[in-house]
Amino acid sequence: MSEPTVVASPDAGPPFANEPSVPSSKQPGLRAAWQIWTNRIFTMREDRFFLFLAVLIGVLSGLAVVCFRIAIEWTQIELLGSSISPSFPRVIFAPTLAGFAVALLVIYAFPRARGSGVNQTKSAVYVSNGYIPFNTVVGKFITCALAIGSGQSLGPEDPSLQMGAGIASLIGRRLRLSQEKVRLIAPVGAAAGLAAAFNAPISAVLFVLEEVIGTWSAGVLGAIVLAAISSVVTMRAFLGPESMFRVPPFRVAKPADMLAYVALGVVGGLASLVFLKWLAYARPRIQSLPRWTEHFQPAAAGLLIGIIGIRLPQVMGAGYPFIDQAMHGQFTWKLLLALAALKILATGFSFLSGTPGGMFAPSLFIGAMLGGAVGAIEQHFFPALPGTVGTFALVGMGTFFAGFLRTPITAVFMVIEVSGNYTAILPVMISSLIAYGISRSYIKVPLFDLLARQDGLVLPSVEERREQLILTVEDAMRVDAALVLEPGDQVTEGIKRLEGKESLLCFLRARPGEWNFIERSELQRLAADGSQTHTAAELRFKGPLPFVFRDMSLEEALHWAGDWPALPVLSRADLSKLEGLVTLDDILKAFRKVPVS
Amino acid sequence: MSSSANTIAVGRKSPRIYSREAVLFGCIILLVLFVLFTAAVSRLYHKSIHVLADSWFAQGEVSFRSGDIKSALTDYRNALVYSPDNTKFQFHLAQALAAAGRGDEGRSYLLNLLSESPGSGEVNLALARIAAHQGLTSEALRYYQGAIYGEWENDPIAMRWQERLELCEYLLDRGLERQAVPEIIALADNTPANDAEHLRIVGNLLLRAKLWNRALTAFRSLLSTDNPDEDALLGAGTSAFELSQYANALDYFERLPEKDRATPEIAEMYRTAQQIKDMDPFAGDLSREAKASKAAKALALATARLQECARQKGQSLATTPPQTQLQRAFADVRELAAGASWQSIAKHPETLDGVMGHAFEVENVATTVCGEPEGADRALWLLGRSRRVSAQ
């Protein structure tokens, strides 16, 4: 075996080889160690190097999120004071003035920091080949800390996701990874940022797969998981391992009790519909206002939120402490309903004004309040139900999240992770699916896709892609369309069986798993001398043919179909058994039958 | 490419190109610096957050102690914002919620704490108090038991004793004597014989639970300590009286200051004990004549009560043959009358028991028919009862 050849190009950076090169023994001390280390790193296979980078990105994103969360807290303490009930002037002036400052920053310094961050990351993956300028990360950090800390009704999760993606993008570019890897590295950072912000690695991974990438790509899954884990570990090292909410213990006693959660699913679904409809209706109208109004939109939103905050300061900011209070049954059902409704209003103001900040925390807040209200009302009328208000608040979070963001799997896991409580899984699955179903029935396009389309971007709809019909060989194959000959069969017999059946194709089964194609003309050629003794073994054939199974995707079959007249469809249990055949023409016909979305 | 694009490309400052090693090395350096920076920032953050949390908590404590529960609630909540997992803060918030009459809200915090430390005596106790306040007896009992057998940081023995006491009082207040008895007995058994303060409390509980024997023992122990007091004498006197140890009861009552004997209940017991002493012909230091005189008087008293009872019931005692209990008892007395004069009894002291037996029987019959007697009759009836008890 020849030694691996390493061809280095000064521009492309060192390529990846299978064996590390040995450093010169003359290089002493630190320099030698550095040489060994870099050799080891850079001579890794690229996929391993990518995993190494995922950890690095995870740690850096985790650190960034720690600083981000601290910045938000400090801003909040400085602007609104340390009490959960801020004084009147602070409630009015802090979000208004900070809103104005944020508008100036977004317009003049960080134009890409606008919005939640999810769509920006998605468009980076699909439009700009994974390119997110680092300036956006800095801008997102500053403007979001100011906006959320001053009481704008937004959350830190989506910005964290974008910051993580931005950090990853920067590293990928600086290391001059291949175009494909640079594009893939942004979601890796996104997962890391979201995981650290939520203290929920599984949800972050699922969200990025569900919403940003849209496919369960094995190539990137490992890196995403590694990045999410390393960012959460980093975050926990600095901010502690506690889950976001402390849920009072509860139990789900009987299957019939699930009916209560069905009701919650309906309410959550309808509420998410209202919110989505409002955003969909109001956003284009706000965007059509004269450009100079952008200077004042966040301030106006801040003022409106401040007015709400005079009576109900709970709606200001991310609102996590109040979710905790709702879970401990500290609000009456009327107050819970009022908080849910006003939070929808306040979040709408903030988001529509273009203030940078995320929708995750507000949707959790709204869900918790709605859930708590439903729980309190149900308990009032049906005191025998086992669930506490806290249980309903917890399940409500997932329910609204699933209906609003249309990521039901993420919603289920997120509830488990943020509460550290597995008991809620059944109720949250039921109510989330109901809310998701209601939301889907009345608004066809999910929130992030809708926002992208309003911005003139045609990003792939993950929901549509997820539900695309996957064609299998079974959809294209023909049965009873083949004549199978064994090597010992007489050629004349074969010709007899083919007579009058023009569509029949002929295969030679040499042994189980070895199938060959025989042209009709070849049979005629051999039989032309009139001899009755010719056997199929004497025929000239094409093969061995690649074979397919009926459950394989048509796209896989398409790889081979062009090179062969037909592909045998075999039984997985018995490779000598022919279940049918498929040709290129059959495959194309099957594809044409499927309606294009 | 268009010319304008070319111009842009030429005009743009091209990014400096570093080797991958340098970039990676830069990343590592940046990472280390970032870690150090984040560590410093987070240290500063945690410090300031702790200060805030502690100051809000301290403010809450002040508000709570001064009875301003509403402010205390806000302060505790503020403290929890900055230290959400602080169990002490959660516990105090729960207590403040309970004090504000919002037991359900307090309970949810406490249940959370209990799930983290199911053995916590403090949390169990707080839950028990909320349940007791809301009238959820079985829940209260469960949590009280949890508190008694739970973990206490400071002086667990004393805390357990205290919580059992609270449980006993709760049960007695709710009229659940049957459930209270084993707890009170356990409490008494766990009370040191030289602990006057606790003995007094236990003795009173035993009195409330009508565990007279144990109460007398407790009060006797209390009396033998260095600082016996009126409570001890009162308790001992009451339990001795209820145990029909009238001589002892009288002794304890007489040692009480005059003012303590003035309460109606004690005065009644004292008077009754005195009457019993006065009419008891069985006292050892009496002369034969005195005994006979007392026995004759007792029979006369009982006969008078019988007649009064018959009058109340509209029965004639002269009816022959006797039909009713009263008539039969009267007939027996009449039969005895000749030998029941004090002279006769003095002459034949062996008849003393028989005469007194008749007197007690007559009182019993009268009590059965007309209800419990009062005054001297009550004393005679009680004397008869105590004789029966001691005979058994």
Image (spheres, rainbow, N blue to C red):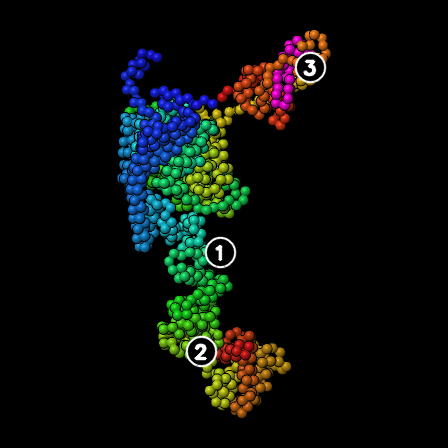
Residue A485: % across, % down: 67, 17
The Cα–Cα distance between marks 1 and 2, rounded to whole angstroms, is: 41 Å
Host chain of mark 1: B
Q: Which residue is mark 1?
A: B138
Residue B247 lies in quadrant: bottom left
Host chain of mark 2: B
Q: Residues within 10 Å of mark 1 (few under 14, many from 20)?
A: few
Residue A61 lies in quadrant: top left
User: Considering only vertical position in the picture, is A464 above or below B392?
Assistant: above
The Cα–Cα distance between marks 1 and 3, rounded to whole angstroms, is: 92 Å
Nearer mark to the viewer, of 1 and 3: 3
Amino acid marked by disc 2: Asn
Q: Is residue A498 covered in magenta? A: yes
* Magenta span: A496-525
Nearer mark to the viewer, of 3 and 2: 3
Q: Is residue B209 covered in magenta? A: no
Amino acid marked by disc 1: Ser
Residue B284: % across, % down: 48, 85
Residue A535, numbered label? 3
Q: Residues within 10 Å of mark 3 (few under 14, many from 20)?
A: many
